[in-house]
Image (tube, coloured by chain):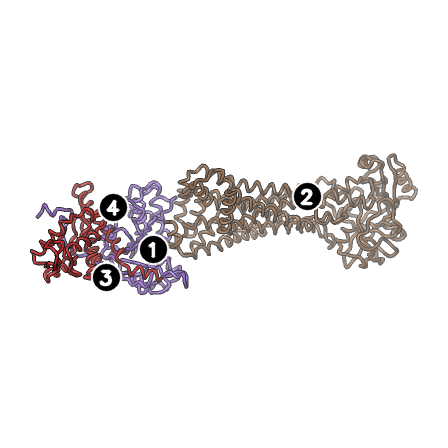
Amino acid sequence: MGKIRLIGRLVRRDLRRHPGPAVLLVLAITAATATLTLGLVLRGVTDQPYQQTRAATNGPDVAAMIFGFSPLSTAPGNGPPKQVPINHAQIEAEVRTLTHAPGVTGHSGPYPVASVALRYRGLVAPVEAEGRAQAPASIEQPKVITGTWVRPGGVVLERTFAEALGASVGDRVTLDGRPYQVVGIAVTAAGLPYPNMCYYPGGNCVYDLQDNAIPSDASNGFAWVTEAGARSLGSAKAPLSYFLNLKLRNPATAPAFANRYGNKASFTVPTLIPWQAIQTGSGLLVQDEQSVLSPGAWLAGLLAIASVAVLAGGRMAERIRRVGLLKAVGATPGTVALVLLAENLTLALIAAAAGLAIGWGTAPLVASPGAALVGTPGAPAVTLQIVAEVVAVALVVALVSTLVPAIRGARTSTVSALADTARPPRRRPRMIALSARLPVPLLLGLRLVARRPRRALLSTASVAVTAAGIVAVLAFHTSVHLNGFGESGGLGNPVVDRDEQMLTVLTVVLVALAVLNAVCAAWATVLDARHASALARALGATPPQVTEGIAAAQVLPAVPGALLGIPLGIGLFDVAAQGAGVVVPPAWWLAAAEIGILAAVAVLAAVPARVGARRPVSPILQAETA
Amino acid sequence: MQQEVVLAMLAKEPSHGYQLRARLRQALGPLGEAMNDGQVYVTLTRLEKAGLATSEQSAGLPDRPDRKVYALTAAGQQRVAAWLAEVSWPRPDLAEFHLKLIAAAAAGLADPLSIVDAQRRELLRRLRDAQRAALAEPDGSAAGLLLEGIVLRLQADLHWLEACERNWTPRLTSRKEHR
Amino acid sequence: MNETGAPVLRARGLRKQYGKGEGLVRAVDDVDLEVASGETVAVTGPSGCGKSTLLHLLGGLDRPTAGELWLTGQRLDRLGERALARLRRDKVGFVFQAFHLMDELTAAENVELPALLAGRSARWSRQRARALLEQVGLADRAGFLPSALSGGQRQRVAIARALVSDPQLVLADEPTGNLDSQATIEVLRLLESLHAAGQTVVIVTHDSRIAATADRMISMRDGSFVDETRLTGGSTGSLGTLAGLNGLTE
């Protein structure tokens, strides 16, 4: 019992005496655990919402598009293709084939679909308007989220399309010039979120694209009107098509069914889409987010780990000395390890709790399960498994940061541990000779870097990670501009918008972590250089020279890191965007980013350096004589 | 036993032989055990013969040195004053200097501190000379070794004088307490 | 070099205190001091009497709470940090009890450091460092790290470093505090040779041997000077009597 009390007292006293590094450590581990929590929570958010929507709307196993026209083949560039209407009998035959096909247990429709131009507040968008009865259908009844279902003069917009338009219930729109009022907003499991409508034959959908190039034809919005309304919207210029929703005895066979009875390339055979494909496509929105979040989370995690490593290194000398002291008064290696472990464990558990809380709180902001799909799951489930995994990670971090000084301490003799010769600075004759030719701040900076090469390497790595993240974000923005996403007549592109939101959040998190990392590194350097800078000042270096020297010691390793970040970031975006091609942001963006990063490193180092450089020299020098 | 020590003991007031002996015993502490009692009386007799002290027989007491009352003569007082001001350093026994300080304080003849300071100054100068001479000798010379010995002894004596100084400054210690 | 007559260092009413009210500590209390050119002054006293604090004040490493301080005619207590640093660089050389050599630099690299900090070229600094190492008798150890040098050698390197910018004043804080008697003798010889060369030195020490090299010795207690001894001039008694040759020579 007495031992536990003693350990508790030692831990409390130590934390009270050095709150700074303890706070930094907690922040770093919190950042790591928060990002980890977020990633784990979001991993579970893909399939569920689509299933919810499908259940809520009794979505179809196979969605069929039956064309009411076929284009005349015309030479390209001779204006829009002329539509030739397909006669009604053929349409009915196609419907019959499908509804009587083996395995089909039910159907709804065929519903007439008109291709119209919707105008709203100066925006123009092509829309597929499906005509529906006011009474709900048994199969594939879209679920109204706000407002009501169709009525004469009213149009119900699909949710992602409404989001892109910026329209809400009560707004007035025109369909092919005719006035309509938005009476409701609904979701459906029979189609993909805007802008990925892909019933156009020969057109490609995102989910079965090989090279991920989305043609502008795919930006059709989706809406519902009354049957009479749809028929009236049809015209000779744009004849009606028909949607048919099928239920199968065995939903798992939907892809085989679609292959057998459908043909995406033809206008005379219906285009069939199995529900699995829709599910995959719907999940793409979140997958997209995931493809942004995953590498982002890795980057954030790396930065957090780098911060923890720097902090651990910075405290290493003091830790080893403590181990030596404890050994000198007779503590067994076990007790020594216990003391170290107790402190790190406390901090790690506090950080884990904080990280879990932050991750849980921010997940709903990020998790929006694809706006098309029903159900905001509220607070996404932070399952027991997630909690266990996060706490385990925090514990591992605590263990590792205990093990290293404990092992080091056990290996170094008590004498040298006490004498603080356990971690002597490295000597680099060439760096020393080189620095002699440089102006004083660079002289000091280069020598400081040469003393601790491993910490310099860690700095380079951290800056490289940060720069890679920022360059990847720049590459994303560049690709958005290049491919003209989000420029479909002024409408928003929810996919891109969502990605941009994610990236903004991620960039903020990355920058915050990078700042934390820089502060940790600067603190460690100032601490390590205390004696050296006091001596330099005693020998005649002015405080500004010392400040600049410490700042230089941070900037010098940052330069190769920032440069390395450019190819890393471009490669990172290439990997994350899954084949968007190598996108290189414009040169002046890159230059601005590089200069910004290096300037930030310099400033973050200069602030603690300046504080340290103003302190009186005598106490520091005299302390060494004790 | 230096004659001057016994003389100085008489400076405060005349006293019996045995009183003198007791005072000396007390001043020397454990070292006083080794003191030869008879020596004190012999010295007193010698001092009387030399005219530096006088003796009187107490009424009703036998004519023995320990029962007589001794007092300083004028010549004796002069001798004591000169002795107090002397700074030549005695050979290795420290008792004489120690007793000098005690006698000076007891008789109110001089400030012990100034005696100590004067002695310190002198020793420092001698240290300087000896050290210069020692450094001037080539490495490993026999004379250099002897000089080094002198230097080290002087250094040790200076340490002791510093201790004396600390011990004999009551007013400064009280000043420190007020701070 | 200084014009003869004007003191290199002059302090008046120098004071340094810490804390306030009940906890007020006067480390240096109303000190007046004048050091002439070429003079060696020793300041002695028990530990905690404020000698090291005084030395740091004299060298501009610390700011006095009150009082005036002139170094070669320049008023120190009014200067800003930058000017102080330049002054230290060009006019003052420091020797510390703990040597304060950089562990990862060789002797030569340690000695040349103040010159480099003053903006001298690398070549000039290295040449000067070598010359000084020769002057202190360590020319053959120029490429050694401090860990490979004995205590006395390390302090001699530190003294060489203090001399690299040809300072007007050398300040030594317990230079033999961490040394054994053999190493003390090495440093003693060096101090004597500096004295002979006309260097102005102020030494803080509790070693009477070091104090004996000075022209003047000042005793300090509780932050103020209590005594001053001039050590130049003859002494009474011959060396013979000191050695106990009394009986033989008489």
- Identified by mark 1, the residue type is Gly
In the image, taking residue A303 as reference, residue A277 lies left or right, namely right
- Identified by mark 2, the residue type is Thr
- Look at the numbered discs 3 and 2 and tell me whether their residues touch, using CB distance below 8 Å: no
Is the same chain shared between marks 3 and 2? Answer: no
Q: Which residue is mark 3?
A: C4
Q: Which residue is mark 1?
A: C48
Q: Nearer the viewer, residue B52 or C157?
A: B52
Which callout, 4 or 3, points to the residue nearer the camera? 4
In terms of secondary structure, where does tag 4 sit? helix
Which label was assigned to residue C185?
4
Label 4 packing within 10 angstroms: few (<14), some (14-19), many (20+)? some
Instruction: Give how far apart the Cα atoms at labels 3 and 2 are.
Output: 86 Å
Q: Which residue is mark 2?
A: A383
- Look at the numbered discs 4 and 2 and tell me whether their residues touch, using CB distance below 8 Å: no
Identify the hue of chain A: brown
Quadrant, the C terminus of chain B: bottom left
Residue C55, by quadrant, is bottom left
Which comes before the other along the chain, label 1 or label 4?
A: 1
Which callout, 1 or 4, points to the residue nearer the camera? 1
- Identified by mark 3, the residue type is Thr
Which comes before the other along the chain, label 3 or label 1?
A: 3
Instruction: Give how far apart the Cα atoms at labels 3 and 1 are.
Output: 35 Å
Q: Nearer the viewer, residue C104 or B53?
A: B53
